[in-house]
Amino acid sequence: MSDYLDSLFSLSGKSALVTGGAKGIGRMISESLLQAGARVYISSRSAEDCEAAVSEMARYGECRAFPYDLSTVDNIAALAADIEQAGNGLDILVNNSGATWGAPLEAFPESGWDKVMDLNVKSPFYLVQKLVPLLQAGAAEAAPARIINIGSVAGLLTESQSAYSYMASKAAILHLTKGLARDLAGKHITVNAIAPGFFPSKMTKHLVSDEGVKDMVISHIPLGRLGEPADIGGLAIFLCSTAGAYMTGTVVPVAGGVELT
């Protein structure tokens, strides 16, 4: 990498927290940030998944696991305390942990509503609340701290696929991104959102494990393929790097054009 490109995209010396960073899109982002030079902390409910991911990603750089169930504010506060105790500050927060639930309208349960809204909307908000002091401490006008909220094209489209709480939660996090961006700009913290389309993950396994269903999904994507790690990892690096320092309050679909259909 030339000195110029390195000055634009290197994350050397930066510390990042990626929630849900052990699997799926969170894992793709974690590996990309590591390879760009960042120190990466990952958190998810499963300690086993976290430790296994850290072991596998260690070849890319310094990575640590902080397993927590982030559906409670007490656990979010405990995670924030652990990150501060680690002693390397925090420059990047990627709010990626999420859940989905599908059921017919007439049978959609309250538990399916509350679980998804809590993890997809409430938890990112309180992670921001608890981690703003740490993010602000290392931020400057020329080098702002970064928050990336992982939404979904489901928050931009009107097709429900009977995932009512999911589509509502993703629309909410995309809108919340804009409000937080306004409020945190003065603290030298940018807030942007990524709205992924169909990427191979646990959440989309039911759509891509069957070849017939997978072909049907792909037929609705103008670019004619599923997302790959470089597609979302490259965007995350951009938003966290010097190259993306003048962007805030943006929602970037990474969906092969499915949001256009």
Image (cartoon, helix red, strand yellow):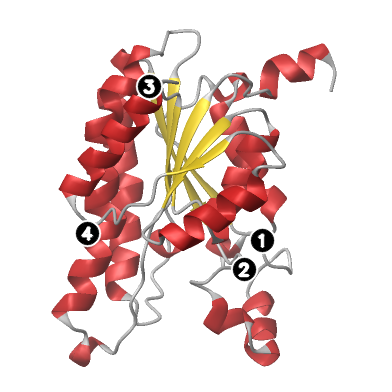
Q: CA distance from mark 1 to mark 4?
A: 27 Å
Q: Nearer the viewer, mark 4 or mark 3?
A: 4
- Mark 1 near mark 2, Cβ–Cβ under 8 Å? yes
Residue 8 position in % (x across, y down): 68, 19
> Which badge, 4 or 3, comes first in the chain's sequence?
4
Q: Amino acid at mark 2?
A: Pro
Pointer 1 local density, CA inside 10 Å: few below 14, some 14–19, many at least 20: some
Q: CA distance from mark 2 to mark 3?
A: 31 Å
Q: CA distance from mark 1 to mark 2?
A: 7 Å
Label 3: which secondary element: strand
Residue 172 position in % (x across, y down): 28, 53
Compared with residue 192, is residue 253 higher up or lower down, i.e. above or below?
A: below
- Mark 2 near mark 3, Cβ–Cβ under 8 Å? no
Residue beneath label 2, please? 200
Residue beneath label 4, please? 118
Label 1: which secondary element: loop
Q: Amino acid at mark 4?
A: Asp
Label 4: which secondary element: helix
Q: Residue at x 33, y 17 (%)?
A: 136
Compared with residue 135, is residue 196 higher up or lower down, i.e. above or below?
A: below
